[in-house]
Each structure stands twice: as C-alpha cells, then as structure tokens.
C-alpha cells in the first residue's frame, strides 16, 4: 500500500479497464480472494489514519463496494475496535448481493459485527463503502435518499472519512460529482482548499488500479489524500490487454531547464528567446491589460529564458519594466518570430485580433493563451491557420481554462468539465497541437501522446495572473529545447508545485501571480519525498 504523491508518475485506468483487469486476476485466484485482500487493506489503513479511534462507523451499500466494507468491519471488530455497520439493504429490483459481497456480509454477521439501521451518534472515523466505481447516485433509485442522508452525516462530522475505491457519487472516469453531492462538497472545500490534502481529514483508498477521476474536476476535493493498493495484482502480469487511460504526472516526468548543468561557455543566446505579444493598452481604452503580458514575460525570465522580448499591443504601454529591467521592449515588426518562442494572448484584448494571424502563420513555436484563444474561437479562418501549423512542423501549445476550451469546441464549460480528459483530447486532435486544459487536475493532451493529469497545485493558483505566469513558463521551457508536450508537462507540474511549496512554507498567506513568477528560481522538487515509505 502506498500514499500517492507528486514524486512519481502513475498509470490511471478507466472503469472498463479496471473491470477487465479484475476479471482476469480473479480467474487465477481462489474465490473471494480479491475482496478479502481489499477488506484487509481498508482495515489496515483505517487503523493507520485513526489509531486511537474508539468507534468506527462503516456505511455499506448494495454491491461489491459494500462487500469491501463488510470485510473491513470484520477485521476491525476482530482487532478490538468498536465497529458499527449500517447497510442500505437491497433495492426491490435486486435479487441479492453479488456472491463475494454476500460472503463478506455473512462472515461479518457470524463474527458478531454490530449492525444498525442508523449511524452512531458519535464516531471517530467513518468509512464510505456505499457505491464504488461505475455506480452513481440516482435520485430515482430506491435507497439513494438513505445514502445521501448518511453522506451528509459524514460530511458534517469532524471525524476523518475514508472512501473505499472512490468517494460515493464521484465518477471514477471523469471526476465529475453528481448533483446530490456537489453542494455539500463545495461548501466543505472552501475551508480546506488551501491546505495540503493530508490535512483535510478526507481520504480515499483506490483498489486494484488508480482511477483518473480521483485527480481532476471534483475528484481532488472529493477524494482528499489518495492511497493505493494493487491487491497484489500487476496489470502487466495479467492476461488483460487493458491500457491506462491517462498518467498522473509526477516529478520524474518534469524536465526543468537546468542552467547549473550548462557549459561554462554558454551565453544568453544558449537558453533561447521568448517573445511575449499581448498587454493591450491604448490612450482611448477603458481597460489596460499591460500587467498580464509583463507577468508572462517575468515568468519566462525567471523560468530560464536567455532573453525575453515584450511587444505590447496599443500605444499607451510602458517601454521599460522598472521591476524587471532585463525585459526588452520591441514593436511586433521588430521581433524575429521564426526564431523566438512566441507567447501570444496574455491581456491581448481586442487588439490581439490584429496580430494573431501573423503569429499563427510565422511563429515556428507558439504558446497561445487567453484572448488569442478567444479570437481563434470566433474566426474559422484563424482555426484553419491553427490546424495547418502542424503540417508545417510548427509547435503549438494552447492553454485554455474551461470556458475558453468551450468556446474553441463550440460547447459549454459545463460540458467540458463533465469530461475534462475527453474535452482536452478532442481539442488536441482537432487542432493538432498540445492542449493544456487548466483547472483542478490540469489535463495535458497531444496527438499520439498519453493524456497526463497534473498531480500538483492548489486553490492558491485561483488568482488573477497565474495563467499568464504559466504561459510565460511554457515559453521558456520550449525555448530551452524541450518539445511542446515535454514543456507543457514540465511547466504545469512546476507551476503547481510552487503553489504547494508556498502553502506549506507560508500557511495562510496569499500567493500573488507576481510572487509566483519570482518563486520560479526554486528547486522545483516535490514536497513529499516519501512516496514509497508507506504501509507494508
């Protein structure tokens, strides 16, 4: 068993692939083996999380997830813990529990595990074994109301909560939480969002495989700190042909530019040039967005670019950045777009529409953000220019948030969030480029590449300008020689890791985009170096 951290990348499997692996593994084992292993694993983790718990409540549902709960309750009871099990019973249209779950319930009853119809008044740990992967809270199904009541009791309690495999109501493939759990979860997440997951009191033990939905959309808030037990089954050693749906991005796949390893004879041109095009500011404009471009440019400089040029759009912007005098201001015509990595769109406003066609047709390496994406979404001709860049061997990274992704896809942000992996994949295939779909569990997709979900970051990044910083970082990483996909994975990981480090080193302090840009000169190593030193 291991606690999942950001140190190493991990394969993430779909519900269908997990079921295939489970069937293949079960065929070579004695009956009931996997559920017994699962129950023992749950019980061991429960003791580790709450070693002094006096009373443990186990809420069991009508399927195999409930069977895992019965099995865990049996072990906890035998180890001397005061255990109370509540069971939803079976819906009228169900003949009985699945065979393994039935066997575990009978074992628990025979051992004298206390059963109740209602949750105990007081408990020190609760175990959510109501619904597992593939099962949803259906308001029209008998028993859902009872499960919802129990979930509300769990969420209102200060006691730690351990979910079996996936939190009830969370889609294991997409990370989308059903409407029945959204309100309560959102309320709780406000209080915990700026804390590391280990401090929230919410835990999930993913069994057999890790599921993608635990790490994106609503998954990170719902799952809290994720633990994993493969139950002694290595998918590569089974007869299953199941492939990972995605990878959880860890530090081992984050390749930062390292100046300390560069040759002594290096010069500023050795580390590449970045040109930031954006920051609309005119004398007649009601809004001035120069700051967005400057944030991207500062981030590019701190992330390792040798030279950073700034081409502001409009006629009222500054010609020098007093806080970062290393930045070189140029007109767009003075830039060498073929040789520089162009970061376009940050604070570009309406003015970006006058330059985006030139960027798309000329820049051999481009990062397109914010208003550049909005301009492309509104113009079919620009979309055609974007698609043809790949045919010319040009590299492109798009960095949309969900609403910008929805505009590009001609859909809604709700539909994008309902399946973030699919949305990112579709945009990457459509425009033949790398797509960084920002948000909780940022998704990185590219044609011919496995999707990656970022393992770092927290709500401190939900502040104006943090996306501009990411765009500048991407430009610097591409300028260092990394491919567009490698740069995207690395920049996204480090961007989130800086926020994680800040939360630990400066608890309670706001992280501004300016501070984030300045923090890019740190080590970039994940906080948790004890990925493998877990339960044995």
Image (cartoon, grey):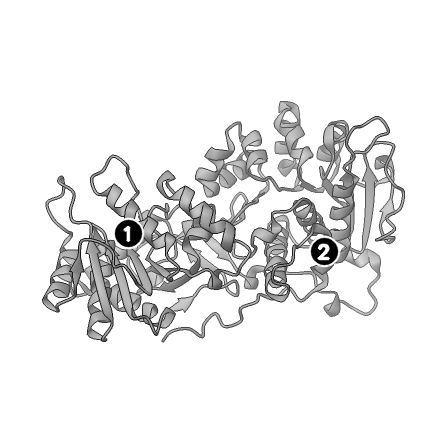
Q: Residue at x 62, y 23 (%)?
A: 380
Residue 79 spot, x, y in % from top left: 23, 75
Q: Disc 1 designates what residue?
A: 19
Label 1 neighbourhood size at 10 Å, few (<14), some (14-19), many (20+)? Answer: some
Looking at marks 1 and 2 on the same chain, the residue that comes earlier in the sequence is marked by 1
Label 2 neighbourhood size at 10 Å, few (<14), some (14-19), many (20+)? Answer: some
Q: In the picture provided, is 352 more to the left or to the right than 63? A: right
| Among the 4 quarters of the image, the one containing residue 37 | bottom left
Q: Nearer the viewer, mark 1 or mark 2?
A: 2
Q: Residue at x 63, y 66 (%)?
A: 505
Q: In the picture provided, is 434 more to the left or to the right than 132? A: right
Residue 278 spot, x, y in % from top left: 76, 37
Q: Residue at x 40, y 63 (%)?
A: 227
157 or 527, nearer to the observer: 157
Label 2: element kind: helix
- In the image, farthest residue toward the front: 121
Q: Give the CA separation, mark 1 to mark 2.
A: 45 Å
Q: Disc 2 designates what residue?
A: 515
120 or 522, nearer to the observer: 120
Numbered mark located on residue 54 in the image:
none
Label 1: element kind: helix
36 shown above or below 493:
below
């Amino acid at each position: 068993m291991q606690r999942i951290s950001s140190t190493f990348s991990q394969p993430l499997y779909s519900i269908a692939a997990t079921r295939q692996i489970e069937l293949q593994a079960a065929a070579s084992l004695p009956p009931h083996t996997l559920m017994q292993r699962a129950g023992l694993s749950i019980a061991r983790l429960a003791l580790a999380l709450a070693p002094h718990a006096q009373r443990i409540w186990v809420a069991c549902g009508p399927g195999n997830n409930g069977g895992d709960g019965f099995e865990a309750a049996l072990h906890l009871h035998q180890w001397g813990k005061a255990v109370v099990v509540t069971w939803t019973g079976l819906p009228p249209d169900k003949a009985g529990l699945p065979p393994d779950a039935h066997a575990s319930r009978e074992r628990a009853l025979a051992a004298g595990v206390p059963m109740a119809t209602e949750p105990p008044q007081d408990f020190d740990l609760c175990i959510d074994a109501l619904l597992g992967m593939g099962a949803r809270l259906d308001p029209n199904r008998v028993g859902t109301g009872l499960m919802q009541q129990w979930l509300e009791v769990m969420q209102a309690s200060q006691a730690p909560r351990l979910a079996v495999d996936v939190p009830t109501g969370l889609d294991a493939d997409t990370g989308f939480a059903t409407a029945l759990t959204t309100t309560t979860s959102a309320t709780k997440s406000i209080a915990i969002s700026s804390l590391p997951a280990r401090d929230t009191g919410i835990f999930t033990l993913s069994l057999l495989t890790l599921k993608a939905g635990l790490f994106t959309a609503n998954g990170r808030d719902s799952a809290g700190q994720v633990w994993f037990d493969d139950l002694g089954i290595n998918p590569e050693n089974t007869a299953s042909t199941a492939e990972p749906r995605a990878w959880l991005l860890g530090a081992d796949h984050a390749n930062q530019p390292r100046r300390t390893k560069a040759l002594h004879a290096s010069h500023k041109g050795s580390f590449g040039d970045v040109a930031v095009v954006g920051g609309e500011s005119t004398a007649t404009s009601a809004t001035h967005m120069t700051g967005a471009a400057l944030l991207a440019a500062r981030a590019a400089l701190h992330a390792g670019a040798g030279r950073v040029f700034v081409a502001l759009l409009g006629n009222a912007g500054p010609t020098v950045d007093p806080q970062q005098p290393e930045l070189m201001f140029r007109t767009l015509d003075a830039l060498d777009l073929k040789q520089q990595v162009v970061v376009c769109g940050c604070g570009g406003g309406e003015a970006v529409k006058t330059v985006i066609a030139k960027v798309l047709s000329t820049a051999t390496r481009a990062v397109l953000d914010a208003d550049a994406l909005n301009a492309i979404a509104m113009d079919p001709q620009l979309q055609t220019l974007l698609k043809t860049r790949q045919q010319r061997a040009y590299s492109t990274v798009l960095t949309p948030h969900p609403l910008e992704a929805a505009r590009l896809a001609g859909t809604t942000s709700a539909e994008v969030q309902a399946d973030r992996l699919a949305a990112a994949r579709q945009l990457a295939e459509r425009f033949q480029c790398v797509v960084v779909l920002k948000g909780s569990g940022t998704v990185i997709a590219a044609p011919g590449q496995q999707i990656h979900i970022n393992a770092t970051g927290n709500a401190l990044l939900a502040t104006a300008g943090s996306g501009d910083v990411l765009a500048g970082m991407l430009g610097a990483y591409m300028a260092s020689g990394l491919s567009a996909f490698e740069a995207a994975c690395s920049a996204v990981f480090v961007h989130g890791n800086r926020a994680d480090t800040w939360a630990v080193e400066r608890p309670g302090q706001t992280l501004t985009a300016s501070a984030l840009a300045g923090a890019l000169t740190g080590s970039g190593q994940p906080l948790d170096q004890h990925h493998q030193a877990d339960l044995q």
